[in-house]
Amino acid sequence: MCMRGRPLIGMVMMLVFCSWTSAKAAPSFPVRITVPPPAGPPPLGAVAETSVPFPAGEIREEAGLMVTTSTGDPVIAQIRAAQRWADGSIRWLHLLFEAQKGPGDYLLKPGHHCRGLLN
């Protein structure tokens, strides 16, 4: 279930790091994204932002991907191709999402992402 209409104005943005083996190897889905403190819902939390590399030909569109909590609950996310390979496939995928469960692991996986104020 999507959570719509949550105010994001005034939230501090932070950079988080994805877990993957290397930029040349295809990430196995799901890709684990570890979010450190102070991420979480307002008023004290922060929006999480990161990018994930993919090898040429791995994925063509971001529309078939979503971010979830470690338990599988969808989170509000903006997912877009930041850079493409010469063949048109996604080289770097940029993610911006609300870490609504606070610090911890989130997953990038196939599915339809929860749209909200970030889109």
Image: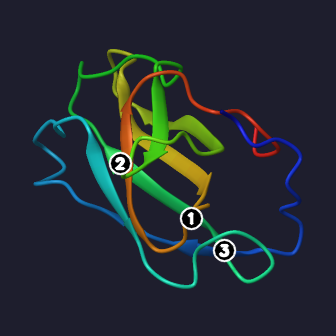
- Which kind of residue does numbered mark 1 sit on? Ala
Q: Tell me whether circle 3 and circle 1 mark residues in contact (CB < 8 Å).
A: yes
What secondary structure is marked by label 1? strand
What secondary structure is marked by label 3? strand
Work out whether 25 lies above or below 70: above
Quadrant the N terminus occupies: top right
| Number of dots carrying numbers | 3
Residue in the image at 53% along x and 20% along y: 63
Quadrant the C terminus occupies: top right
Q: Is residue 14 left or right of residue 118?
A: left
Work out whether 33 lies above or below 113: below
Which one is nearer the viewer's eye here, 63 or 40?
Answer: 40
- Which kind of residue does numbered mark 2 sit on? Val
Residue in the image at 10% along x and 54% along y: 21
Q: CA distance from mark 1 to mark 2?
A: 13 Å
What secondary structure is marked by label 2? strand
x, y (%) of residue 34? 35, 66
Q: Tell me whether circle 3 and circle 2 mark residues in contact (CB < 8 Å).
A: no
- Residue bearing the label numbered 3: 46
Q: Quadrant of residue 111?
A: top left
Which of label 3 and label 2 is nearer to you? 3
Residue in the image at 37% along x and 47% along y: 107
Q: Is residue 13 left or right of residue 49?
A: right
- Residue bearing the label numbered 2: 52
Q: CA distance from mark 3 to mark 1?
A: 6 Å
Which one is nearer the viewer's eye here, 21 or 46?
Answer: 46
* Mark carried by residue 48: 1
Residue in the image at 23% along x and 35% along y: 29
Q: Callout 2: few (<14), some (14-19), or many (20+) C-alpha neighbours within 10 Å?
A: many
Q: CA distance from mark 3 to mark 2?
A: 19 Å
Work out whether 30 lies above or below 12: above
Q: Is residue 19 left or right of residue 105?
A: left
